[in-house]
Each structure stands twice: as structure tokens, then as C-alpha cells.
Amino acid sequence: MIGWAVVCLMAAGPALAQTEGENGGTAGAVAPVPRTRAEEIEQQRLRRLAKLQPETTTSTESFLVKVRDQKLLERVFGGIGGLRVRFGGLATGSGFALGPEYLRRDLAGGELTFRASARASTRGWQLYDLELRAPNLLNNRMFANLYAVHRNFAGVNYFGPGPDSRRTGRSNFRLEDTNYSFATGFRPIRPLSLGVTGGYLQVNVGPGNDDRFVSSELIYTPQQAPGIDRQTDFLHGGILAQYDTRDNPGGPRRGTMGLFRWDHFKDTGWEAYSFRRLTAEVQQYVPLFNDRRVFALRAKTVLSYENTGQQVPFYLQPHLGGSDDLRGFQRFRFYDDNMLVLNAEYRWEVFAGLDAAVFGDAGKVFGSKSQFNLHNLESSVGFGLRFNVRNDVIVRIDTGFSREGFQVWFKFNNVF
Amino acid sequence: MAALLVGAPAAVAVRFYPDDPLEKMPPPVNVPAAKARKLSDYYDFFNNTFREMGERQSEGRSIRAENVNTVGEVADDVWYTNRHAKRRMSIEELKRGPGDGNAPSMEKPWKLVSAKAEGITPGFTMEDGEGRRYVIKGDPLSNPEMASAAEVISTKFFHALGYNVPENYVVHFTRAQLTIDPEAIFYDKRGQKRNIVNNDVDEILWAFPKDREGRYRALASLFIPGTLLGPFRYHGTRSDDPNDVIPHEHRRELRGLFAFAAWLNHSDSKALNSMDTLVEENGIQFIRHYLIDFGATLGSDSFAPKSPRSGNVYLFGWKQAAEQLFTLGLKVPAYARVNWHDIPSVGRFSADHFEPQEWRPNYPNPAFSNRLPDDLYWAAKKVMAFTDDEIRAIVTGGQYSDPAAAKYVADVLIERRNKVGRAFLDGVLPLEEFQVREGRLEFRDLAAHYGFRAARPHRVRWALLDNETNEVSAIPGGEGDVAPRAVTMLPEGRYVVAAIDAIAASEAGKTVSVYFRKQGGGYRVVGVDRTW
């Protein structure tokens, strides 16, 4: 390409008129020597006119435009007529899961959301659920939720009870339960939500299907793992309060989240497994350097209070280990009646769509509340990458190291 | 310099035509057929981030802008029209921008013809009572006025700077102003296409902040005239346009746009924020090129305040990413240390940390990447042409309800303007307004004129130019501001060159060669050539 001004400065006027440039005419064709700059430009345009072609895009770009214009991604994730494919959402360890989901957000003028799904994983785990939700009633002052779910998790890890369980004691069991629940509450001020919950839970546990490990009931007794030998149902209810000033729950950079729950589980079958549970969690995000660096801190505890002569069934015990708490340990590594975990992360921005993090986790499970202290904590450290879209974490890769080796977690959610 | 005086290549044609310097391009050639085509945001991002698109500058070979006339200016054409810097616009003209006579009529209801709830900025298209179509875009709820003010202000600046831009207006309206066209199309959050209903309108308007009177405030962008053909790329040419002969990465107004974008923090200056239209005038059909969508300028990123990164680093860059990753973030970038003023209607906009040379759009732009000192000098002249009062006047177009916001934006723009001037004027010898008067060469040193430095000592050497052969011959003893006798006695129609260079060693290599033609008894500047 030879521009006319450069031609002028480089004194190559006739050459432009008589030879072929990128936009030029047939080699050897002699155009009249221009007498003015305007003529020179017009000649250049006329030579190009003879070679015009339709404007095109590459096939890749055309495809991407088609995806955008025909809303293909929105259709895949948003569904057609409310029907779509739902990925994941089963417990960690389930393998890759997907299934159909029917979702309607436009009921009652947008006040009601209805959702129903059926999902199965590559390891044969299943989940079926049904939900009716009104998240923003009375001008966002009130919320209500009805939820029913049936889970059939074919091979949940169990390493035995307590903090001293051995890594070599790995077994697995089938957890099959159905829960009908409701939650409703109000928001007296913007960051504060107060609510009550209730429901009915039916549980069945059985032999696990993971052939690599022994089935739990073969090596653990009912004394070690209460409830492993018989099924029961629970009536449950409780209260909750949440205070949330996080700037963006999908990838917070500043703010506080405090959660308090008190739940009562009443064994309606054997009257042997009734208990109450306190769950308390605090998250604090401390931004530095215009939110380009964040210290993220979390403390969480779950404490169980058994009725006299009662036990907490092992499948409802809090547990530690996995992608969301002690990341250097295998999932469901520790079970007991109580749990305490502390997490600290330093996160920093690598580029617009990626944050990196180094983290430290510490925690323990324990049988007696007298052990609610910071002694004998299990710990792990590690690093991670968090891919985000507009600050919402969409993919997280964490690698945690502990005395039991290391674990790599690939998750589609934020850790906290 | 020496090469210019004595070593010019053998000439085969005239160096200057009678119509040089061309101030207006010839009328466009008729475009027989132009097809609309769309571009992909993602494709554009990945292509420009991971590949070098277009023809690039290389070591030892710089490609100067190819659409400048012989004095280094851009002639008026379908891309660009010289406005404020060439012929000073009045305050009223500057405030008017691309037009102020087509604001949406409030006399009759607006007819909503299409809308979308998906995407990051919900909005809709409507037709007013006069049958004019507008795109209506709201501000983020967290930052009322921010995006609409930024868009209107920047539209007026880009218009005064010379670009084709749409007419953008701040509007205030109520729900009662909107009616629905029975055929109106709606894309819901899942991308489903259907007819729009009242609830959809309500849902869209939830995302629009209201003003003190309870009205919705938004931006109304008038549809630009002609048939929309899709965006232009910042590299290559349109293959169906006979008038598009200069690769876009070598167009001066697109390279120089870097400086304007830096000044106004137009970090989203990408292909997708441009538009070609097919228009017909005087029986000729041709393509006009527009810049559109200035919602992500100043402190606004359209849907939120700008990220502190914005304007400082690309969204992705290998070096910066590796640096951040492997230092564990302990190397804190300067932009992360800036104290931002907390004015929600402004967003994140500052001059404190602004370094024009270091400014970056969201991702590489081929024309920006090809910028040379003379491109930036050209642009800096135009930025510096805005006085403080003119900047303040244009900023009133943003209609900030808080006078402090308007004052802050204007103050920042004034400071950023000065930084642009300081950074880019001195990339070449910033000499302008050449004339030979009473036997002396006179010119203005713009850096000195704007108070950035003292007038620099310089040296002038005179030579004669044979325009037919392009041979330059030095005039013996022809040194100094005073023109030698050979110049003062120059016959009508003959050419002379004044080659100016700075004496300071720090400016070695910077020269300006000014070509005069004896014409009508005076000396007309027909060429300016700069080296650096």
C-alpha cells in the first residue's frame, strides 16, 4: 500500500500512477499522470473500484457472531421454554453431573421462581429437586422458599469418627435422603435477614458403591458411626440470622458476612438421634490497594447438642476436608459432632479475569465442647487461581498441602 | 536533515501539486454495493490481544501515517472533519456538539420497538412522536448520572475533535412516557425472543436510576443516518469500499485517536464501538465512518465505575500477568495506589496518576500501536486547542445534578489536557504557524506557547527546491531566521525550504522542514516535514 501523502514526500508520483500497488490496477497499465493531488487520489480510488470484493469475516468470527446474535449461549444456559441443561450441583466427589432443569422466573409477574431438576453424575450419584421461591416479596423486605430434594449419593467418603481417624480407614457409604423444607423471613434493614426454617428429613444409608474402598458398615460399628445400622426420619426446624455487607457475594473484595443458625433435629423414628445444632460463621474481607489485593478471612463452627441419651447420626455430623475448608485433605476426611475451621487467604489480581491466592486453613472436628479451642488443629496451606467474569468467580483451581499430601481442586464456585 | 537538503532521491514527478496542501478530499467515488456485516467482540479481543493485526512498525522502518496532506494534516473526508483546532468553534457550537435539535420529543408518548433484559446494560429502542429512533441506555443504579454524563460529554469532545459521532442526549422521563409497539421484540434474560409486555418494561426500568423528581434519567442516542454496515476495524480496509484506500492502522486520525482516548479515558476504544453507514448525497452512495458508544469514558465503565486498572494496563498482557503472578502481587502497580474521589456520578476518574504515554485501552488497538511521535503531536495540538472555559462549557452537557461533580470532571480534564500536551507536543519540534514576513521566518513554538517550556534555541537553513525534479540545493550562506536574498528574490511559483532544527543536544534528530511556494507575491506553506 502506498499512501498519497507518503508518495508526495518521497517523490514517487508517476510510479504510483503506473505501477501496481496493493490497491493498484493491472501491472503495466499506464494511467494518465495526475495534474493535481485530487486527481491522484481519484485515480487510486478508481483502480480500487475495479477490484472490489464483498466484505467478509472469517468463519470463526462468523460463528462467534452467530452465537451472540442467536443467543446460543443464553439458550444453552437459559434454556428453551424454561427447560435447560443443569451442570454440577451435587456433593463434592460425585464426579461430573448434569441433567435437565425446568426454571421459570416469570411467575406471578416475576415474584415467584419455580425450579425442578433431575441430575446424575458419572459416578452414579443422583439428585432430584423441586423449588418454589419468592426472594423479593414486599418490596424486597421478605422472602419465602419451599424446597423438596431427594439425593442418592452412592459413595460418600467416611474415614471413621473423630479427629484421630486414620487416612487408611477410608470407606464409603450410600447416603439416600429426602428433605421437604421451608424457609421464610424478612429483612428489617438492608444487610440483615432474619428467618425461620422447618422441614421433614427422611434418611437411608447403605453400602457404598465405590469398589476401590470398603463399604463403611463393614468396618465401622454403630458405636463408632451412629445411625449406620438403621434408618430414621427427622422433623427439623430452626432460626437464622444473616448480616451481609459483602460487595459481591460471587467474589467479594470488601465487607462482612455473619451467619447464625440454630436448628433442632427430632428423630421421629427411633427417638435415638435427636439433637440441636448451632452454626456460626463470620467472613471478613479486607481490601488493599483499591481492592486489587484482598485479605479474606473466615471462621466457622458447627456445634451439636445431643438430647440426653441421644447421638448425632454420623451422616449429619459436620465434617472437614475438601475443597471448601481443609484443602490439603481429602474430601470428608474428618467427621465428629463439632467442627471448627479457620481460613485465611491473600488474593491478588493477576489480570482482569484472574486472581491468584495463597491460603492457610486450620480446623478440627471434636467430640466434646470442652475441646472448642485452637489446640490440635489440622492445617493445610496452598495456592490457587480464580478465574472470574466481572468479579464473579466462575472457575477455581486450588492446590492444598497437608501432612497427608496434597489435593488439587477444580471447582465452579468461590470458596468464600 | 542533510538528506533532505542534498540527498533527495532523483525526482520523476512534481513534489507539490498546485492543490497542495489538500484540505478536503475529493468527493467519494460511488460505492456500488456494500454489505452489512457484524464483528465479534471476543474475536476482536483475542485477535488483538494475541496477534498483531495489520501492518506494524518495525525496527529501523517506521511507517508514517498515510492519509496526511503535505503539511501533515488530515484532509476533511468521510472519516474526519477538521473542526475546533482548525477553525475555533464558539462555546455554543461546542456545547451543541453533533447537534442539539433532535432531542426526543416529549410531546407524544415514545413507542418502544425493541428491548433487552440480557447483557450488562439493559435498555431499549424507542421511536418518538416525530418518528425518530433512539437507543435508550440507563446508568448503573449504584452510580446515577455517571454513564449518561460521560457519554454526552465525550460525544461533544469527539465531535469537536473532528470525528463523526451520533447525537446523544440526557433525557428524563416517566413510565407514562412509554407505550409498547404491538410488534415490539424483547430478549429476556435467557435470550428468548418474544413480544414485549408491560412487565418487561417495568423490569427494564428497575435498572434505571431516578432523578430527584422521580423521573428516570437515561441516555438517548439518535440512530445515525444511513444504512448500518457494522463496525470498522482498526486495521486493513473495507474490501467493498473504493474510497477506503489507506489501511486503517496507517490512518492519522485513528493513530492520533490514542491521545484523545487517553485524555478522555476512552478505554473501550475498539472496533465494536464504531459504525460504518452507507449514505447517499448528491446521487453518490458512499460509506461514512462513525465512533459510537462513549459510555465507558471518563470515570465510567458503562455498567460500573471504571476498574482502577482501566486505562493503565490491558485486560491481559503476558508480561504484566507474569509479573503479578510470580511476585505474589507484592509488586503493587501505581494505579492500585491512587486515592479516588468518591463521587458516584463521576466514577473513577483522575489526573493524579495519569501518564499519557503509558495510557492503555482495554486491549491492543492496531492503529494505536502504530502511533508515531508525529501522530501524537497532531493529536496533542487538537487537545491543547480546548481552553479551560471551553472544557467547562462542554462538561455542562453532562447535566450533573451535583455542581461539584461537574467542577471535578472539568478540573480533571484540564489537568489531563495539560499532561497530554506536555507528553506529546515535544515528541517532535512543536513548531507551527510558519510564515515569511518582512524577510524573516516566523513560527510559534507550541510548547512555549502553552507554557510547558521556554522557547528553544534553533537553527534555520535555507534551500531551493526544484519541484519538477525534486532536487534540493542549499543556498550558500543561507542560515538564520532572516531569509537570504535567493529567497526574497524567489520568482513566482518557485519553491524554497526552511529546515529548522533544535540546537540542544537532547533534541538531536528533531527537525522541521517547511516548504514555501512563492505565490501572489507572498510565501505559501505547501509542505511541512518533521523528523524526530
Image (cartoon, grey):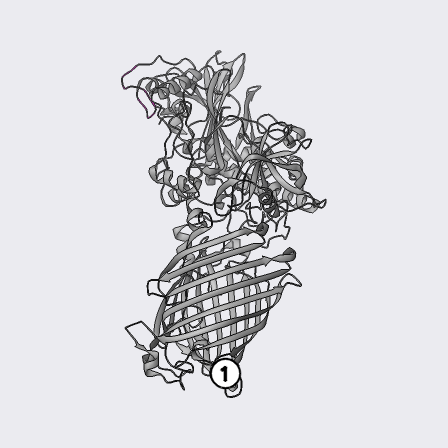
Chain assignment, label 1: A
Quarter holding the N terminus of chain A is top left
Q: Is residue A213 left or right of residue A293?
A: left
Q: Is residue B430 visible?
A: yes
Q: Secondary structure at mark 1?
A: loop
Image height of B444 relative to B334, above or below? above
- Which amino acid does the dot numbered 1 rest on? Glu
Residue A173 place in picture, x, y as percent? 36, 75
How would you rate the neighbour count of disc 1 (Cα within 10 Å): few for under 14, some for 14-19, many for 20 or more?
some
Q: Which residues are magenta?
A: A20-29
Q: Is residue B174 left or right of residue B126?
A: right
Q: Quadrant of the rendered structure where residue B325 is?
A: bottom left
At x 48% / y 32%, what residue is drawn? B275
Image height of B6 relative to B357, above or below? above
Q: Quadrant of the rendered structure where residue B97 is?
A: top right
Which residue is most to the bottom? Answer: A309
